[in-house]
Image (spheres, rainbow, N blue to C red):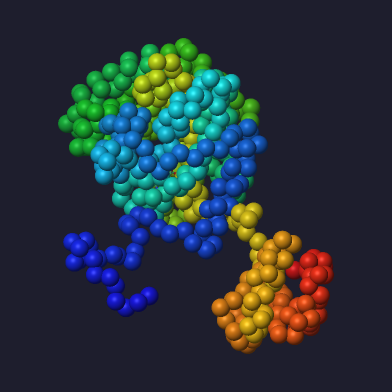
Amino acid sequence: MSKKQPDHKEGGREEAKLQSPKGMRDLIGEEYYRYQGFFEKAAEVAIYYGFQPIETPMLESEALFYHGVGEHTDIIEKELYSLRTKGGDRLALRPEGTAPIMRAYFEHGLQSQPQPIMLYYHGPFFRHDNPQKGRYREFYQFGLEVLGSGKSITDALIIRLVNTILTEAGLPNLTVEINSIGDRDCRPIWKRELVNYYRKHVKEICADCRERLKDNPLRLLDCKQAKCQTLKAEAPSIISYLCTPCKQHFKEVLECLESMKITYTINNNLVRGLDYYSRTVFEISITFPESNGVSATPNGTSTAIAGGGRYDYLAKFLGSKKPVPAVGAAIGVDRVLAAPGIANLLPRLIKKPKIFFIQLGTEAKMKSLSVIEILRRSKVPIAHSLSKDSLSTQLGIAEKTNIPYAMILGQKEVIDNTVIIRDMRTHSQDVVDLTKLAEHLKSLKS
Ligand code: HAM
């Protein structure tokens, strides 16, 4: 790095900080591979269950999230990264993937294809939250959505899939919490009762809950403040207000989970932080040792690594005349990869180099890229330091990398159309004709 940094102050700009923005970070080296490895494993499971990939833009119209996620949610009120473009459009960095997927469903006329449409996606999402361990401003999700079916089997399919992906990733001891928050027939009755109950106790609740009471009463059940816990425990419970179809739907989902031997806990306080949900909502958590520092619950040991539910009204919120019943979930990949017991899932593309390629002299350097191309065609991954000239420097680097073989191309080998293959462990060497190289390399032990 040059000592003198460009002085941006002259142009009225701040000096460039050589640091990623708060709550965001680079993924590099082993960490990058771990993320890719997880995405590949999750995609593989989703594909076996009949899901198709989709990638939506990082930026969407701000209105999509206002209407989709809900104006009075934390995500919109506190955490949305919104911006006005030079052309005057109001856009937002996506805080979640479900509203964009529903937008894409309509934009591409997917409602005219056989239903349901089953999609998976992964990538970065953005929320301007307070960064701490396990909570970032740029974080990664792997999401699954089933659009165009209201059947309880699709709720079970989503929970099953999330559970399978997390289990395949090596995470035991998952806790599945589930609830039903009713539909537009029964939920308003429960909501009214909840509001009446909290109004009677308004003096006893925290300041945040007073706001929630006005704007988003269901979120009262999410409060973690000690002073609100007793009240919360005695609040009217949704379960007594569910209408017959909602009760039946919930019963069917639970029966499906039981038949698959997925252990669950019913948590009637689980409402989730996004407005589009109806009927089934669920979260999957994992318990971390205290020292890990990742916590989302008052006891400081457990965190939600995936969440989702049914969102039968989202299409209507976005202006569709026809309802599109749907259900989905997203896995918080940063939290999964920080969990104890996580498997080391390496991406398929990553191949450990078997050969360290060494060149000596101008002619050899010129021929290097052609020899590397022979190796690539034979699918032999290599490492090299083409920018170095001396044999001892290159051998020194090769020793440090622990790569089992070195391939040496010098002046003589260029003339003879050969290379030297050196076993770095025994220091024995073979001269191999370039025309027989691919064959010879296949016979080498790793
Ligand atoms: P969500 O619960 O907001 O749901 O996010 C899903 C998961 O993303 C969380 O359980 C958590 O593991 C992870 N996550 C959320 N925020 C952060 C953060 N700031 N840093 C690190 N990880 C985070 C949704 O986003 C819904 N779209 C899920 C869904 C799909 N519902 C239906 N379909």
Residue 87 image-quadrant placement = top left
Whereabouts is ligand 1, in terms of quadrant?
A: top left
- 404 left or right, relative to 51: right
Residue 394: image location, x then y, percent: 62, 82
- 412 left or right, relative to 137: right
Q: Nearer the viewer, residue 39 or 238?
A: 39
- 19 left or right, relative to 88: right
Q: In the rendered image of this protein, does residue 117 appear above or below residue 362? A: above
Residue 209 image-quadrant placement = top left
Q: Give the residue drawn at x 31%, y 47%.
A: 128
Q: Can see residue 167?
A: no
Q: Give the residue drawn at x 42%, y 34%.
A: 100
Q: Give the residue drawn at x 65%, y 61%.
A: 351
Residue 23: image location, x then y, percent: 35, 54
Q: In the rendered image of this protein, does residue 122 appear above or below residue 133? A: above
Q: Nearer the viewer, residue 188 or 25?
A: 25
